[in-house]
């Protein structure tokens, strides 16, 4: 599969740290002290996964990039270049080099971000869905000022909200990361919608400005709600390093090994979290979104999980679905509120699993097909096991935090260590630790890990 990396950005905000150096050549050190340009780290990761046919689109200080990487032989790759002498927009180059792309899907990556991703997983997802475009999406610590992707249950993208767009009061923290799998057919489709002929890309318009093509606005967004563009959710590392502050943050992550370790080809560690009574105030069966309220310190606790390199994954029994008291859509809105409120405080969850089943019958409005003995309802470990399969999690190095016996039993059954939140003794429970709040539990776990390290 061909990989196109857009490496022509000027990096004006970070140029004060590295004057005269194109952004893709900014050096960064790993935990062993080895220093390489950020684009070299990314190319090495791609080659290790079998993506060796690479095209770099370059512009600003392009000679430095071309001289550094050459034909790519030193990295086990074949590197070609498209030099953008005239501004073409962030997608114009794709039309200019259409003949190089062939007929098969290709990876389109943005060198403005630091990334280390298992792209084989993403390509597999793309092929399974059979769409024309797959967007890499992830949660981040500032969804309120990021572009949000809205998708249905099959992950088909239904809408795309820029940070300037009006958004719903509650939304899922799903942010576009600028990494894509694209079928070249999309370019032909786009050509028919452009207000000019593709042969005129780069030529001056009636106002003397070069005609450009915008990737998001003109190629991708028109695919929303067509069933031909999908979101690929992943907790892997993708971060912009366009400002000095963000560069220092990425540098710390690189030195700590966080960037590489988050690649899903590596075993992950998770802290699983119960929902009611652990993250939000316990009100019995939560049926009304207005009754949802984060517990004090919960967002800070989850933020610390995010910073630790552990995945934060919610696993919650929701028998209200089987009982007919809350619809799937109403539950999703409650979970959107959870993610929105966490995002306002700089925290996010990497995954959320719920069990909709309930074994007992006799409730008015119940859903008969959900009144079953299942493998996902805690104290059974089904949700934790499903998460471990989705995210390649090492359960033996993971934790389960909850406020009840079923949480402790589910964690133990999955092979995790457990923390029980409690004010008094709970019969027949034997957790590895106890705590009086989620924040206290996370602090204890992180202290224990620092001692082991």
Image (cartoon, grey):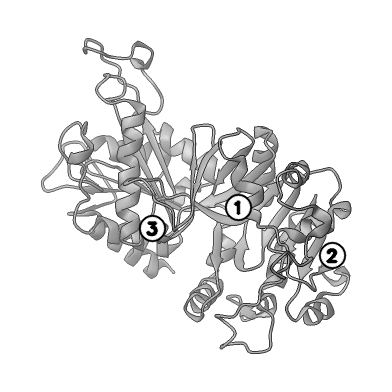
In 3D space, how far apart are the residues under numbered discs 2 and 3 (Cα atoms)? 41 Å
Residue in view at x 50 percent, y 79 percent: 248
Mark 1 is surrounded, within 10 Å at the Cα level, by few (under 14), some (14 to 19) or many (20 or more) other residues, namely few
Q: Reading the chain from its start, which is encountered first: label 1 or label 2?
A: 2
Q: SS for tag 3?
A: helix
The image quadrant of residue 21 is bottom right
Of residue 318 and residue 194, the one placed in the foreground of this image is: 194
Q: SS for tag 2?
A: loop
Q: Reading the chain from its start, which is encountered first: label 3 or label 1?
A: 3
Residue 217 horizontal side relative to residue 411, left or right: right
Which mark, by number, is residue 217? 1
Disc 2 target residue: 76
Which mark, by number, is residue 273? none
Foreground: disc 3 or disc 1: 1
Q: Position of residue 396 (x, y in %)?
A: 45, 48
Residue in view at x 69 percent, y 63 percent: 89
Mark 2 is surrounded, within 10 Å at the Cα level, by few (under 14), some (14 to 19) or many (20 or more) other residues, namely some
Q: Is residue 342 at least partly visible in the picture?
A: yes
Q: Position of residue 190 (x, y in %)?
A: 72, 45
In 3D space, how far apart are the residues under numbered discs 3 and 1 (Cα atoms)? 20 Å
Disc 3 target residue: 144
Q: Position of residue 243 (x, y in %)?
A: 52, 77
Of residue 156 and residue 27, the one placed in the foreground of this image is: 156
Q: Are marks 2 and 3 in contact (CB under 8 Å)?
A: no
């Amino acid at each position: 599969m061909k990989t196109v990396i857009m490496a022509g950005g000027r990096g004006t905000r970070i140029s004060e740290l590295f004057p005269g150096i194109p952004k893709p050549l900014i050096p960064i050190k790993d935990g062993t002290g080895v220093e390489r340009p950020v684009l070299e780290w990314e190319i090495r990761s791609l080659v290790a996964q079998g993506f060796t046919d690479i095209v770099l689109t370059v512009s600003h200080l392009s000679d430095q990039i071309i001289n550094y990487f050459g034909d790519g032989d030193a990295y086990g790759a074949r590197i070609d270049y498209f030099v953008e002498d005239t501004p073409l927009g962030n997608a114009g180059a794709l039309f200019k080099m259409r003949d190089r792309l062939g007929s098969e899907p290709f990876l389109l990556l943005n060198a403005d971000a630091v990334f280390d991703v298992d792209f084989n997983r993403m390509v597999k997802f793309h092929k399974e869905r059979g769409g024309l475009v797959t967007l890499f999406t992830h949660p981040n610590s500032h969804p309120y000022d990021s572009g949000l992707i809205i998708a249905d249950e099959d992950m088909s993208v239904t809408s795309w909200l820029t940070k300037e767009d009006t958004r719903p009061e509650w939304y899922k923290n799903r942010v576009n990361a600028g990494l894509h799998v694209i079928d070249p057919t999309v370019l032909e489709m786009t050509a028919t919608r452009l207000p000019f002929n593709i042969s005129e890309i780069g030529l001056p318009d009636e106002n003397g400005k070069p005609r450009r093509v915008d990737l998001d606005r003109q190629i991708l967004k028109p695919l929303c709600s067509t069933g031909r563009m999908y979101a690929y959710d992943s907790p892997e590392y993708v971060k912009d390093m366009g400002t000095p502050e963000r560069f220092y943050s990425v540098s710390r992550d690189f030195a700590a090994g966080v960037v590489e370790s988050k690649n899903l080809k590596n075993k992950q560690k998770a802290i699983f979290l119960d929902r009611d009574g652990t993250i939000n105030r316990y009100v019995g069966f939560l049926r009304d979104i207005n009754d949802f309220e984060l517990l004090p310190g919960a967002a800070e606790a989850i933020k610390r999980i995010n910073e630790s390199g552990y995945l934060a994954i919610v696993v919650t029994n929701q028998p209200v679905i089987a009982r007919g008291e809350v619809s799937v859509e109403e539950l999703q809105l409650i979970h959107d509120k959870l993610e929105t409120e966490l995002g306002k405080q700089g925290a996010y969850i990497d995954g959320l699993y719920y069990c909709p089943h309930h074994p007992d019958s006799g409730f008015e409005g119940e859903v008969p097909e959900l009144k079953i003995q299942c493998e996902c309802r805690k104290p059974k470990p089904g949700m934790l096991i499903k998460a471990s399969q989705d995210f390649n999690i090492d359960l033996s190095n993971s934790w389960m935090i909850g406020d009840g016996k079923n949480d402790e039993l589910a964690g133990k059954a999955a092979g995790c260590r457990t923390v029980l939140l409690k004010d008094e003794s709970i019969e027949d429970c034997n957790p590895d630790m106890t705590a009086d709040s989620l924040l206290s539990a996370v602090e204890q776990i992180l202290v224990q890990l620092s001692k082991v390290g």
